[in-house]
Image (spheres, helix red, strand yellow):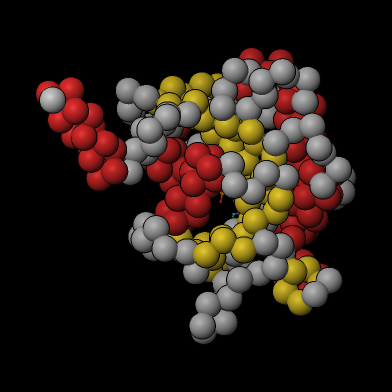
């Protein structure tokens, strides 16, 4: 009887805190970033173990008994291999352009996608990979991506390279069938709004709210990411998150 009461209490506690019954070992690249810091918090709040990766780990001030902060660079294969091996999920939420070639291949998101796939496909029990992409990759009408409608003259060259690199990364994943990836796409606008837990999951088309806006808070985007980490509901697909 006492055992039954303990079990019921444990189940009630898990339901009320939203904690996962099976905690995951999650690596987060970009943990110091504007999106990544929400993802770290969401994962910890849901009972997971988190490894936050940064080139300058001292800039991550958050402390938690289930949080490890490690130094790592996505351009360093040995470091990536060491950090991701044996984990359950790797989340990639990074930005940047390497060098000044101006080519989409120089976008960090594309380079990181290639690097992680190259590391993961060799592993027997490889972690799943959740890639935070860009809204430029979303269709705003059939066959037309948002990127194609952007007024190039108003966009800094570096940002254009990043957007093209996000699309290139998505196209690259489309050919990858030996790694469990999901390309999780933000809407056009991220807000600093609260965590509501209420949003929609779409596919490769941009989701609009009743007022025609395409937006979500970073906190809710983090909820969607950790939902996907826990449920693996959209393997080898692009999904989008928006209100
Ligand atoms: N509307 C949209 O589509 C939209 C808008 C905003 C963001 N996003 C997406 O959201 C994601 C995160 O954006 P954010 O705004 O959070 O970016 P952010 O604040 O600029 O952070 C960028 C992150 O990239 C990491 N990084 C850069 N170079 C790295 C390297 N060589 N190795 C490892 N990590 C590296 C940085 O980590 P350290 O400096 O700590 O190493 C930093 O945490 C990106 O995928 C971005 O495309 C999409």
- For the N terminus, give its image quadrant: top left
Which residue occupies 86% across, 43% down? 175
Q: Is residue 95 visible?
A: no
Asked whether, in this view, residue 133 is left or right of residue 52, the answer is right
Which residue occupies 63% across, 27% down? 127
Residue 99's place in the image compared with 87, above or below, is below
Where residue 149 sits in the image (x, y, percent)? 78, 74
Residue 170's place in the image compared with 126, above or below, is below
Which residue occupies 59% across, 47% down? 233
Name the quadrant containing residue 83. top right
Between 222 and 62, the one nearer to me in the picture: 222
Asked whether, in this view, residue 55 is left or right of residue 133, the answer is left
User: Which residue, as the protein is rendered here, is positioned at the far bottom?
Assistant: 211
User: Which residue, as the protein is rendered here, is positioned at the far left?
Assistant: 2
Which residue occupies 67% across, 61% down? 203
Where residue 143 sits in the image (x, y, percent)? 84, 71
Q: Is residue 42 visible?
A: yes
Asked whether, in this view, residue 74 is left or right of residue 104, the answer is left
Name the quadrant containing residue 65. top left
Between 56 and 88, the one nearer to me in the picture: 88
Where residue 79 sits in the image (x, y, percent)? 66, 18
């Amino acid at each position: 009887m006492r055992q039954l009461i303990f079990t019921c209490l444990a189940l009630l506690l898990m339901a009320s805190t939203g904690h996962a019954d099976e905690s995951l070992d999650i690596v987060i690249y970009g943990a110091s970033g504007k999106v990544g810091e929400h993802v770290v918090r969401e994962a910890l709040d849901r009972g997971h173990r988190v490894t936050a990766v940064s080139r300058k780990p001292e800039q991550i001030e958050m402390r938690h008994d289930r949080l490890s902060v490690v130094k790592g660079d996505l351009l360093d294969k040995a470091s990536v291999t060491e950090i991701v091996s044996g984990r359950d999920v790797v989340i990639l939420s990074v930005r940047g352009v390497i060098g000044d070639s101006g080519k989409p291949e120089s976008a960090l998101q594309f380079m990181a996608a290639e690097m992680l796939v190259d590391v993961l496909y060799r592993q027997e029990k490889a972690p799943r990979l959740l890639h935070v992409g860009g809204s430029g990759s979303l269709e705003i009408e059939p066959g037309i991506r948002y990127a194609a409608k952007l007024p190039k003259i108003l966009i800094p060259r570096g940002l254009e390279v990043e957007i093209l690199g996000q699309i290139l990364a998505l196209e690259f994943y489309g050919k990858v069938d030996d790694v469990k990836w999901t390309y999780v796409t933000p809407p056009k606008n991220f807000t600093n709004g609260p965590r509501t837990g209420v949003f929609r999951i779409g596919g490769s088309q941009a989701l609009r709210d009743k007022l025609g806006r395409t937006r979500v808070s970073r906190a809710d985007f983090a909820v969607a990411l950790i939902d996907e980490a826990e449920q693996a509901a959209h393997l080898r697909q692009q999904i989008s998150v928006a209100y």
